[in-house]
Image (cartoon, rainbow, N blue to C red):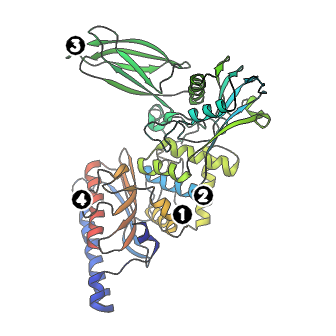
């Protein structure tokens, strides 16, 4: 389907049969029907109370098919990820590789003893260890431990240290709420991240009134478990919950778990770099490499991290090409990965792994692309902030620009496909539209959005953006958006 967007759109079969004048009239009639029908959709109960912004364009001849408030700023929600990922693939290239290194500040003796610390240096790879969102099947920590074993290292006399100083401390968008920062959707941004920077706590019942059976993921002894939760009867009220004691690695589980239930809860990591170092240490020990020291972490501004130039690289993990990481961001709408990408842009191209530096690179990209960004506002890389503002015309212009880039086919494939995968797997799944739409979804409280590329039944290829703000009925508005897309596929 990508090839459709790499050539001009096919003419309507009926229009071609009618000749030049008939073709123009048929197209005009179809366009008027399209606009009238969409206007009717927007006036229905559940949709009419929303604030709508729509821009739909036929890029083969730049025909504007539908516009509703095209220059009005809207909250885009996760549609903003298209802006971040487009800037990244343009500025760093689809084949860019993240590099995570194992360094030392001491010599390796002939007997295999490392007379110093072993420092795990993160540079923004979001997929070092992600059981559910992996771009690579194998843990980077295990790979690095294998390489150290191959070098003949048998003992680390110093500490195992996780270094996340490539990024500055977390500086999320101003529009992020305190509640969002405590969820996996707002997990801390860290240059040395592990499992999306959350630990999953699970519990299953044992015998009545006995302690529940607790597990953690990642499976590591780094966390101390204080289990105060008990198994209740089948009809007992479920009150079990978990918390991570501030400033410690102690997970406290309390309450009651009914005997017929299981429990699963995520906890946001306070220090992902330290957790990564702990997992790395255990991978070393599994391979017979003993560690005398402790597990520690280094952060931006710490004195030791400034001496990185004097460290010796022992082993390095290189990620899959960047475009693989973009699939997770765009298809699954992964916030943390988008925020890490934004800071990687800043670190790679500005020498500063900050939110602000990343946004400087994104804005530079928009200027170079010639896209009018006067009315937009960017506050983060994922769309979680309510300070972000995009206009429908801006977003559609960006999509149109990408059509002409050499990496377009790769980028196109990172978007969710209607009725097939990602956040569109269960949307637009009717036979006539399934697979016809590659797009990015967006959802926040009172916000529902969709933007991307659409192939019509007649062979035309469109770019579209549909923003709805001040939404009172998410399901009805989402249904309206899907009906507009289905109408475009079938009618135009």
In the picture as drawn, the residue positioned furthest to the left comes out as: 235
First in residue order: circle 4 vs circle 3: 3
Disc 4 target residue: 430
Disc 3 target residue: 233
Relative placement, left or right, of 46 versus 278 is left
Relative placement, left or right, of 27 versus 169 is left
Tell me the residue at 25%/16% (across/down): 259
Disc 2 is placed on an element classified as: loop
Disc 1 is placed on an element classified as: loop
Pointers 1 and 3 in contact (C-beta within 8 Å): no
Residue 93 is tagged as 2
Is residue 74 depicted above or below 30 in this figure?
above
Q: Nearer the viewer, residue 222 or 356?
A: 222
Q: How many neighbours does mark 1 have within 10 angstroms: few (below 14), some (14-19), or many (20 or more)?
A: some
Give how far apart the Cα atoms at labels 1 and 2 are.
8 Å
Q: Quadrant of residue 255?
A: top left
Pointers 1 and 2 in contact (C-beta within 8 Å): yes
Disc 3 is placed on an element classified as: loop
First in residue order: circle 4 vs circle 2: 2
First in residue order: circle 1 vs circle 4: 1
Relative placement, left or right, of 74 versus 95 is left
Pointers 1 and 4 in contact (C-beta within 8 Å): no
Give how far apart the Cα atoms at labels 3 and 2 are.
57 Å
Disc 1 target residue: 407
Q: Nearer the viewer, residue 486 or 48?
A: 486
Q: Nearer the viewer, residue 272 or 391?
A: 272
Give how far apart the Cα atoms at labels 4 and 3 are.
45 Å
Task: Tell me if I can see residue 363 in this picture.
Answer: yes
Is residue 247 depicted above or below 444 in this figure?
above
């Amino acid at each position: 389907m990508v090839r459709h967007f790499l050539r001009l759109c096919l003419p309507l079969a009926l229009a071609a049969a009618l000749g030049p004048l008939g073709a123009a009239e048929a197209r005009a009639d179809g366009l008027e029907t399209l606009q009238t029908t969409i206007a009717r959709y927007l006036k229905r109960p559940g949709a009419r109370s929303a604030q709508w912004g729509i821009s739909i364009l036929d890029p083969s001849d730049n025909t504007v098919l539908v516009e509703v408030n095209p220059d009005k700023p809207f909250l885009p929600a996760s549609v903003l990820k298209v802006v971040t990922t487009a800037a990244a693939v343009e500025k760093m290239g689809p084949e860019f590789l993240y590099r995570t290194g194992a360094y030392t500040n001491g010599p390796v003796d002939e007997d295999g003893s490392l007379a110093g610390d072993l420092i795990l240096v993160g540079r923004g790879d979001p997929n070092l260890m992600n059981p559910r969102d992996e771009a690579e099947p194998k843990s980077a920590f295990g790979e690095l431990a294998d390489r150290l074993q191959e070098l003949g290292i048998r003992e680390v006399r110093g500490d195992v240290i996780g270094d996340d100083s490539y990024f500055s401390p977390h500086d999320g968008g101003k529009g992020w709420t305190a509640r969002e920062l405590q969820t996996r959707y707002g997990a801390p941004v860290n240059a040395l991240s592990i499992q999306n920077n959350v630990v999953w706590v699970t519990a299953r019942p044992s015998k009545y009134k006995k302690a529940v059976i607790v597990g953690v993921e990642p499976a590591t002894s780094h966390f101390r478990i204080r289990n105060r939760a008990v198994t209740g009867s089948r009809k007992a009220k479920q009150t079990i919950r978990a918390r991570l004691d501030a400033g410690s690695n102690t997970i406290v589980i309390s309450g009651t778990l009914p005997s017929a239930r299981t429990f699963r809860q995520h906890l946001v990591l306070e220090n992902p770099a330290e957790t990564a170092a702990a997992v790395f240490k255990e991978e070393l020990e599994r391979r017979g490499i003993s560690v005398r020291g402790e597990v520690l972490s280094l952060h931006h501004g710490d004195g030791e991290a400034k001496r990185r130039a004097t460290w010796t690289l022992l082993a390095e993990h290189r990620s899959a090409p960047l475009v693989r990481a973009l699939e997770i961001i765009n298809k699954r709408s992964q916030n943390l990965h988008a925020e890490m990408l934004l800071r990687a842009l800043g670190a790679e191209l500005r020498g500063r792994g900050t939110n602000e530096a990343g946004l400087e690179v994104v804005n530079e990209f928009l200027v170079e692309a010639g896209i009018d960004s006067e009315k937009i506002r960017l506050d983060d890389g994922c769309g979680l902030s309510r300070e972000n503002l995009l206009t429908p015309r801006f977003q559609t212009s960006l999509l149109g620009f990408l059509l002409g880039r050499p990496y377009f086919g790769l980028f196109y494939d990172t978007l969710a496909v209607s009725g097939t995968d990602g956040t569109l797997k269960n949307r637009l799944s009717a036979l006539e539209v399934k697979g016809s739409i590659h797009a990015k979804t967006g959802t926040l409280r009172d916000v529902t959005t969709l933007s991307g590329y659409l192939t019509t039944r007649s062979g035309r290829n469109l770019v579209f953006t549909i923003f709805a703000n001040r939404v009172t009925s998410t399901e009805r508005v989402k249904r309206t958006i899907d009906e507009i897309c289905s109408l475009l596929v079938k009618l135009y």
